[in-house]
């Protein structure tokens, strides 16, 4: 392990903080296996077993992330490095220390579950993460989503400790928080505090935030993407926000899954940060997504999926609780998973956008400059339920680097790393619309998964390399005129609209949104700015 990374991840701390977190707790359960954690969860009435063996739980009031409640402690270590603002909200060490002390007091004389996990499949850039929770199912989630060290694990102080206390609430008036919920990362003390929410996604994204802060200093690019590889070993990356298809499209029976959400790109290649998958399962079906369907079994956790408590039947089509239903399971529950989850430098890269306006081409080739532009733009549509405050309809959004909520540093830091890698490794770049065709949301229809899979297969196999392509008149990307197993009319986004003049207005409107959003990226070079869409 590089000595400088070891020093950086430990920050200025000299003590193992997790020992303090446990000294006043009641009974402590250390590193239980999935079977024991499930037994505890059922006995404590935290969840029920479904007919397929998965543990079904509810996350209570919050069924998605709470981005306004996320903070980073501002101190000497972070003051000049973090991109402070609405995404990275600062909180003082004094406020954090007071909050953390009270959070520790809240677990006094309580049952506590501790899981010692790893994050980062590349041993050169791995972190040991100690997760301390009040709920058995949160411990199970951590065990299944992070990397499980070999048992018995060799003694090793934790690089970071994560304290997850959903029943503890902050006091905004005195604690400097936005609400009673808080998700706070303290890089100096190597601590994460999650309080006032039971949504387990906050755990995995906190670890992602840690990597996004530490790895750029090591020349490693952290990425919000899924990854898989073919029989030839060639790796593909799939960037996109929640609901755009990262997990679904990377879980391809004909390819080998490296990971579904978070990766690093080092000088050696690509590696997964996690040891599990966190799949959206609203409207999940065996026919459309067989690998994910088969992975949901004993040992998996289902969040907020409606279940008949008598028959234990699951209703994946129901959004009665939330649209953001989730399944968490270990990577080895997926057939053809790559273990350890590492791969070579990618040969192809796909930017996934669930376009709610229905105007983006289903698939298009990007120049390196266009890839940089669209990476910085990070366009998609937020899907209802993934964050608090969203309604039933998708909301068009731009999220820098397809992961702005998790980036402590300025977006150009990550974009610069991408540009360097695109030049060095000659990566083929594509934009894929997994959203609507034939009209906007509510009028058109969602792109068929089978068509998207066929387009990706053609791009990866080289079948689109010699196909005639036409430049889109508004977005200037190259659109193939034909693709195996895809009707030619589906490739024509404009022609799919009954009213082509309405399409033209919608396309011009979306292009204007792109240009307006990009005004803040003043650091981008002229070649990248010239890649902007426009009529």
Image (cartoon, helix red, strand yellow):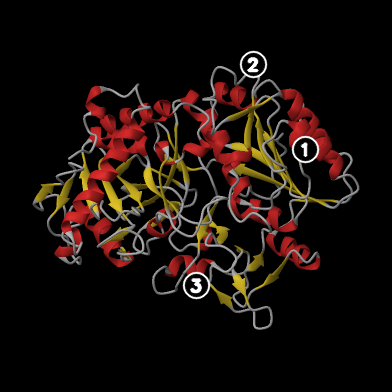
Q: Is residue 425 above or below residue 451?
A: above
Q: Position of residue 329 (x, y in %)?
A: 57, 59
- Give the mark count: 3
Would you name the residue on which mark 3 appears? Answer: 317
- For the point 63% across and 33% down, which residue is it? 71
Query: Of discs 2 and 1, which sits in the foreground?
Result: 1
Disc on res. 171: 1
Nearer the observer, 190 or 268: 190
- For the point 61% across and 55% down, which residue is it? 144
Q: Position of residue 229 (x, y in %)?
A: 35, 51
Q: Quadrant of residue 126?
A: top right
Nearest to N terminus: mark 2 or mark 1 = 2
Nearer the observer, 185 or 236: 185
Badge 1 element? loop
- For the point 18% across and 59% down, which residue is it? 491
Would you name the residue on which mark 2 appears? Answer: 76
Badge 2 element? loop
Outermost residue toward the bottom in this view? 311
Query: Of discs 3 and 1, which sits in the foreground?
Result: 1
Q: Residues within 10 Å of mark 2 (few under 14, many from 20)?
A: few
Query: Of discs 2 and 3, which sits in the foreground?
Result: 3
Q: Position of residue 212 (x, y in %)?
A: 51, 33
Residue 40 visible: yes
Q: Position of residue 502 (x, y in %)?
A: 21, 55
Outermost residue toward the left in this view? 468
Nearest to N terminus: mark 2 or mark 3 = 2
């Amino acid at each position: 392990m590089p000595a400088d990374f070891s020093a950086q991840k430990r920050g200025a701390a000299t003590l193992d903080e997790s020992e303090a977190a446990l000294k006043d707790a009641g009974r402590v359960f250390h590193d239980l296996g999935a079977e024991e954690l499930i037994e505890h969860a059922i006995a404590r009435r935290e969840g029920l077993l479904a007919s397929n063996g998965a543990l079904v739980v509810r996350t209570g009031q919050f069924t998605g992330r709470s981005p306004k409640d996320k903070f980073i402690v501002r101190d000497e270590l972070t003051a000049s490095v973090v991109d402070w603002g609405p995404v990275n909200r600062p909180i003082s060490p004094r406020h954090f220390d007071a909050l953390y002390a009270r959070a520790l007091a809240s677990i006094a004389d309580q049952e506590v579950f501790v899981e010692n996990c790893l994050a980062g499949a590349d041993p050169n850039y791995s972190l040991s993460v100690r997760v301390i929770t009040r709920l058995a199912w949160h411990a199970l989630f951590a065990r299944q989503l992070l990397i499980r060290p070999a048992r018995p694990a060799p003694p090793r102080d934790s690089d970071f400790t994560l304290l997850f206390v959903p029943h503890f609430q902050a006091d905004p008036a005195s604690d400097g928080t936005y609400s009673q919920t808080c998700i706070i990362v303290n890089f100096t003390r190597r601590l994460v505090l999650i309080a006032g929410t039971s949504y387990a996604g906050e755990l995995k994204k906190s670890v992602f935030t840690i990597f996004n802060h530490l790895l750029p200093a090591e020349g490693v690019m952290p990425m919000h993407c899924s990854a898989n590889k073919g029989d030839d070993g060639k790796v593909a990356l799939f960037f996109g926000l929640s609901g755009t298809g990262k997990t679904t499209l990377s879980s391809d029976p004909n390819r080998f899954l490296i990971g579904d959400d978070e990766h690093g790109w080092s000088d050696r290649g690509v590696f997964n940060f996690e040891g599990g998958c966190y799949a959206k399962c609203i409207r999940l079906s065996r026919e459309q997504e067989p690998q994910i369907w088969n992975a949901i079994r004993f040992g998996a956790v289902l969040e907020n999926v409606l279940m008949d408590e008598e028959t234990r039947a699951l209703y994946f089509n129901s959004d009665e609780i939330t649209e953001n239903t989730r399944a968490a399971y270990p990577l080895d529950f997926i057939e053809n998973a790559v273990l350890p989850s590492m791969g070579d430098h990618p040969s192809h890269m796909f930017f996934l956008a669930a376009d709610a306006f229905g105007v983006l081409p289903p698939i298009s080739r990007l120049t390196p400059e266009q890839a940089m532009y669209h990476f910085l733009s990070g366009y998609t549509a937020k899907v209802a339920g993934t964050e608090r405050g969203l309604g039933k309809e998708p909301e068009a959004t731009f999220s820098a680097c397809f992961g702005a909520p998790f980036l402590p540093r300025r977006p150009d830091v990550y974009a610069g790393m991408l540009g360097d890698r695109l030049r060095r490794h000659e990566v083929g770049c594509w934009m894929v619309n997994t959203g609507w065709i034939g009209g906007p949301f509510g009028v058109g229809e969602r792109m068929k998964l089978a068509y998207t899979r066929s387009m990706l297969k053609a791009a990866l196999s080289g079948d689109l390399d010699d196909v005639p392509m036409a430049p889109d008149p508004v977005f200037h990307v190259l659109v193939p005129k034909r693709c195996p197993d895809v009707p030619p009319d589906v490739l024509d986004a404009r022609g799919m609209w009954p009213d082509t003049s309405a399409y033209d207005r919608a396309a011009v409107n979306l292009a204007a949104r792109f240009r307006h959003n990009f005004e803040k990226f003043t650091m981008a070079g002229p070649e990248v700015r010239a890649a902007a869409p426009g009529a």
